[in-house]
Amino acid sequence: MKLLPRLAAVLALAGGAAAITTVPANADRGDGNVACNSGEICFYYDYALGNLSRQFWNPDMDHSNDYYWDRASGSQSSIRLMDTAGSFWNRDTECAIKIWDITSTGGWFVTFTAPMGWKGDLRSVGKQNRNNGHSRC
Ligand SMILES: [Ca+2]
Ligand SMILES: [Ca+2]
């Protein structure tokens, strides 16, 4: 599992051996900094990246409980990530990111596989507003 080493790295960055509490999946905010930094998986509301961004370290197959962070005002927006991503930047250092959608009958399928380093407007691949979750590798 990739999750544990990554979580360990986050805890190490945060100052080490603090009490380890259970972290819900929707608490994943990547490195917590406004920039989309190395290792992060970054979704954007607008088509040309922009201020409304939601960033992760890990897979998250439920985008319904995630909201964009407004990087200009430094606060969480009320715009839900699910089915609203306009652009994307894969800064994962190990692998491609698969973006998933759900059919009208509830079936999951990969709508777009973003290679490592892929960055841009999801309209360019016809996959804007088609995100219910993402997975790694
Ligand atoms: Ca989530
Ligand atoms: Ca970040």
Image: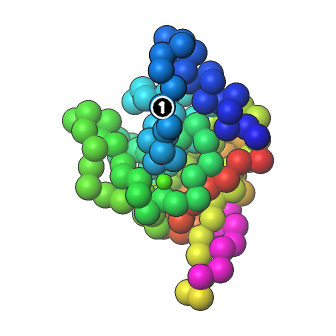
Q: Look at the picture and state if 103 lies above or below 51.
A: below
Q: Residues within 10 Å of mark 1 (few under 14, many from 20)?
A: few
Q: Amino acid at mark 1?
A: Thr
Q: Quadrant of residue 130?
A: bottom right
Q: Residue furthest bottom?
A: 105
The magenta stretch spans residue 3: no
Q: What residue sits 47% from the left and 21% below the top?
A: 19
Q: Quick check: 93 left or right of 74?
A: right
Q: Quick check: 120 left or right of 1?
A: left
Q: Quick check: 58 left or right of 23?
A: right
Q: Secondary structure at mark 1?
A: loop
Q: Residue furthest left?
A: 73
Q: Position of residue 36 (x, y in %)?
A: 50, 32
Q: Quick check: 75 left or right of 39?
A: left
Q: Position of residue 90 (x, y in %)?
A: 63, 42
Quick check: can you spot residue 120?
no
Quick check: can you spot residue 89?
yes
Q: Look at the picture and state if 48 lies above or below 33.
A: below
Instruction: Give the main secondary structure, helix, strand or loop, of the magenta stretch.
Output: strand
Q: Quadrant of residue 27?
A: top left
Q: What residue sits 54% from the left and 21% below the top?
A: 11
Range covered by the magenta-colored residues: 106-112
State how many labels appear: 1
Q: What residue sits 31% from the left and 58% below the top?
A: 79
Q: Which residue is mark 1?
A: 21
Q: What residue sits 41% from the left and 53% below the top?
A: 66
119 and 7: which is toward the camera:
7
Report the coloring of the rendering: rainbow
Image quadrant for the N terminus?
A: top right
73 and 12: which is toward the camera:
12
